[in-house]
Image (cartoon, helix red, strand yellow):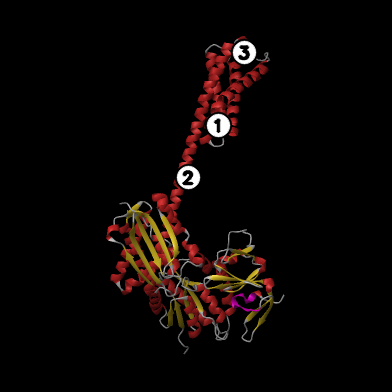
Amino acid sequence: MGLRFLQAAAVNSLIALGLTLWGRSSFGSNFVYSQLIGLSIWALIDFGRLWLIDDWDTQWHRLVILVPVGVAAGYVLGTLAGDGLHGRPVLAHWLAQPRHSLGMLAMSLVVGAVVTHYFLSRERLASARQRELAARGLATESRLKLLETQLEPHMLFNTLANLRALIGIDPARSQQMLDHLIAYLRATLQASRAATHPLRAEFDRVRDYLELMSIRMGPRLSFALQLPAELEDEPVPTLLLQPLVENSVLHGLEGRIAGGHVDVSARREGSDVVLEVTDTGSGLGAAGEQAAEGFGLAQTRERLATLYGAAARVELGPGATGGARAMARFPARS
Amino acid sequence: MPAPPTALIAEDEPLLAAALQAELASAWPELRVLATVGDGASAVEQALALLPDVLFFDVRMPALSGLDAAAALADDWPPSRPFPALVFVTAYDEYALRAFDSQAVDYVLKPVQPARLRKTVERVRELLAARAPGSADLDATLSQLRRLIEATTQSPAGGETPLQVIQAGTGAGIRMVPVADVVYFEAADKYVRVLTEAHEYLIRTPLRELLPRLDPAVFWQVHRGTVVRATAIETVVRDDSGRLGIVLRGRPEKLPVSRLYAHLFKAM
């Protein structure tokens, strides 16, 4: 506001200078009138817009009224103030030289419109930049959140502890475990970049995770993956199944002394691909249900919705033989 | 010559249990590991059966966490025997680590580093040596455990108003039960039983999530799975074995008080 006031005053001074060079009256008189008229116009338009325009995108056309009314009213106000200041009869100039006064009014209209346009386009640019920054911040935040859940420190350090133990006992198996860990970490870090990958790759990542967990949990975890050959190349959002499988292991099995079994399968149903994660864990009571309905499921749902809209569905329910069953359905590519 | 010290390991990941035992064999050769168990409930059971000198408890275990297992053990521990030295084992638990540090509780991080384990072993040996035979340092352990459990139970967002009604699902809809009518809450498997003078309801919110939403001046936790409205308590009596039990107003059951919470009941 203060900056715009100074800029308006500068424009007014230039006008006064121009008028003087043009040979109209003294610079002093021109300067006083210019500032009084120009600043009145500025104040009417700048405050008027705060009052009239709340939402820029839908109400910008109100300017079409505001600018001419502001200019005309400001012109009259400024002239009256100038006349009063100089002790001249009110509007004497208007009566004496109506053509010249109309010309000055027209010039004020043009200057008012140009200056308003200048101020507002600068402001819009700044707010667009701010919006863009906010959007970028949001995207970064969700990427970080994904990374954080994937690279959960408890999971990471327990896995490393197992690896450290395994190196001493079974070097060959510890190498396998390390390979799974490397693939898991690589997939996690890349997931935030690539939007989709083939279903085959998704199953490989799920296998990495389950292999790691079954080394950790020993006989308490068993699993089976079933991917028909014709669906191997079907594109899916990266790490789509991962949160569902993690829910099964962490909320379904890990809390149970006996552990359990996880099945991950893909099948074709009509024009849809159906992915299913079932477990024989503790099911959807109490804490399990709330936890499972949390970030993991919401994430899967959101990622499918961005790609397929209403054509995709994610459901969580009780499994046929106890435990839980998560299902994702979306249209096949071919 | 004194008997060699004995230990119990509770760790749900078999490789890690074996690794800890192997590291202990070199850091503390005379220590005898009596048993290795994979869950919190078995840890309590085996510790009571074997009465070891040292406990190595994983913090996250199925059925009962390491902390809860230690608390349950303290409850049933024979008062004539010194309580075992406790060492917690954890991969990464932000809250727990902070609490362990502030309560000077021994812990080792996974993967277990031999140097760190040796230091812990040194401290535990000093602790065992300082322990007079037969003396009950149970009270110190209890208050330490109590503070640990308090510190690791995440408190709710500050200034939240306490719960006014319990919304219990019935077959047909929702039953609104005023909190003031509740005599006590009791954890039961996947549910929490809500008991008023005349009725019983089941809700699915776990007790540990419910607890922070209750006014602590009104509802007291008296056991791991029991929270009682203080004004519904008629008398607290000690039985032959020295255990406290609560007699309620308006309900016939007698509720046991855990040793962990026995400090709540003192004559003014």
Residue B193 seen in the current view: yes
Residue A263 or B119: which is nearer the viewer? A263
**A135 over B21 or under it: above or below:** above
Residue type, mark 2 in image? Ala
Q: Which label sits in the foreground, 1 or 2? A: 2
Label 3 vs 1, first from the N-terminus: 1
Q: Chain of mark 2?
A: A
Dot 1: element:
helix
Residue type, mark 3 in image? Trp
Residue A210, image x, y percentages: 36, 66
Query: What's the residue at 46%, 62% (across, down)?
Result: A292
Residues behind callouts 3 and 1 on a single chain: yes
**B163 over A220 or under it: above or below:** above
Tell me the tag on residue B177.
Answer: none
Label 2 vs 3, first from the N-terminus: 3
Residue for badge 2: A134
Residue B91 seen in the current view: no
Dot 2: element:
helix
The residue segment tinted magenta is B252-263
Residue for badge 1: A3
Residue A273, image x, y percentages: 35, 57
Residue for badge 3: A94
Determine the CA span between mark 1 and mark 2.
25 Å
Determine the CA span between mark 2 and mark 3.
52 Å
